[in-house]
Amino acid sequence: MTLTPLHILIVEDEGLIAMDIEGIIEDGGHVVVGSAVCANEAIALYDRWKPELCIIDVELLDGTTGIEVAEHIRSKGGTAFIFLTATPKRLHGDYRGGIGVLSKPFTHRQLSSTLSYLNEGLFDPPPALACPSNLNLSSAFRHDWAPRIA
Amino acid sequence: MEDIDAFRLTDALDAEQGTGDPFAAAVRSTRMPMIVTDPRKSDNPIVFANDAFIRLSGYSRDECMGVNCRFLQGPDTDPAAIDRLREAVAARTDVSVEILNYRKDGSTFWNALYMSPVFGHDGDLQFFFASQLDVTEIKDRELKAHEDRAFFEAAVKERTVELEQALEQQKMLLHEVDHRVKNNLQMVSAMIRNQARVSDSADVKAALSQTLSRVDTLGVVHRRLYEAEDISQFDLADFIRDLATSLLDTSSRPEISLDLDLQSIETSAQNASPIALLVNELLTNALKHAFPDPSQGGTIRIASRQDASGFSVVIEDDGVGLPDRGEADAAPAPKKPTFGTKLVRSLARQLRAQFIQEPAHPGTRSTIRIDADKTRMTE
């Protein structure tokens, strides 16, 4: 079945990488609702657009971090976010209540298959696709999205 | 009173004449300082002090007699040692303490004091007998040894802290470098992908996509190295499995299947990138050229073996074979060698690897063989 495309917020301070993520999202038929370079901007965009998924880098501009953004989303009752970082080990605490973490550097394939997987997981759980190798799920989502074996 | 008289009598004895009590004479003249106190009198005063005690303390006999021996204590005397003496007197038991005492001139000495009660026939307490020994030299040596040990322990502790800090800093730097390398690799990939996305030319897109695959390969190697416990070693088999699966996924050629026969190969971190790039080239080549007919698939077999003298990786396809293939051809090709061919040769040279590409009937077999001693030479 064809799922509705995801509306996604990009939180990434590196312009070149943000542009690439945007391209990969659009290649996959999804929609970018906004792109933020610092936590304050991300929080404002989140509140305005209520995206279905946020892709969050950890180190952001102005000394802010993606963890602040994650905490804001959690405070609004949301969990639909993944971190995208070169230092996944720094994200203890089960990925701050989010879905998981995708490690940098990622390939086009890894991000696009992650998006397809999350699309299924968010709109028609549990996902039928296999979890992409570079995506680490938090234990809560690993449990909820475990393949249903008859 | 009778007892004091007896002691006075003893004082008056002339030992050399051998008259009087020979034990008293011995006590009087021994080099071991000794005193006797009378606990039945108020404040337990000294009732006898021998010459050796007089010499040690610097006080005259008149000054000592009839007073409590606490006049030997001074400001640096350990109160705990005094308490032990007091408790022994109260409990009428013997006691042995090392105590800092003061001479009349104010100088100090370490006194190894042994004190014991003396009971009469009917069991009543009559005296305390105390012997003193000046152990200042031994005590000084002990204190010096203690100070030396404390000094060395402090020095070792300080050095340990320094080393721990250095290690911590090194870890932090490694972490920082790792982070930057990953981000930079991601930026290089992003740059190539962004460029490819806006290009209208299929050739440009293909060339960029090939470059991207090489950069991504380096990224995967880096990630695997830094995620491993031991960053100096790299498991080639795990890497090949990931790479092959991912390349096949990306190729959109479901009719091509993989046959992986991988034995674990530990290689040095230094060799990880060139080997990974080499395997990437050969696999990409096989996917691109071995099965030109989109309707006809086949199998790509990858085997890795490690033995005492080194290791080998074999990539074999059952496709159309060498004559129809331009890239990675071992025989000198009449046309200009492609970048891929040059890269394979250059990487093999860097690795001091034997590289053989030959017909497999059907298909093509590429073998990379690296001898252990040659690997070491490159380290």
Image (cartoon, coloured by chain):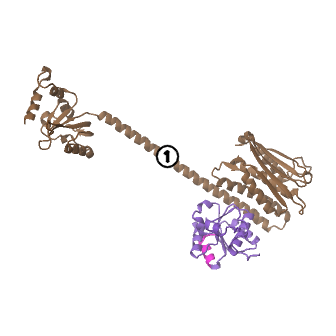
Chain colours: A purple, B brown
Q: Specify the segment rendered in magenta.
A: A37-47
Letter of the chain that mark 1 sits on in the rendering: B
Rendering quarter of residue B62: top left
Residue A87, relative to residue A68: is it above or below?
above
- Rendering coords of residue B13 (x, y %): 11, 25
Which residue does the image show at 60% across and 66% down from the upper left?
Answer: A95
Q: Main secondary structure of the magenta part?
A: helix
The type of residue carrying mark 1 is Thr
The residue under label 1 is B160
Of residues B198 and B308, the one nearer the viewer is B308
Q: Position of residue B159 (x, y in %)?
A: 49, 45
In terms of image quadrants, where is residue A49? bottom right
Q: Is residue B154 above or below residue A149?
A: above
Residue at the (10%, 27%) spot, across then down: B12
Place residue B189 in its image quadrant: bottom right
Residue sitting nearer the eye, A81 or B317: B317
Identify which residue is drawn at 58% across, 54% down: B172
Residue nearest the viewer, comparing B107 with B213: B213
Count all numbered tags in the image, as a single digit.
Answer: 1
User: With respect to residue B365, does A38 lie above or below?
Assistant: below
Q: Locate the N terminus of chain B and report the quarter of the image it occupies.
A: top left
Say left or right for B125 vs A106: left
| Rendered location of residue B255, percent (x, y) | 85, 62
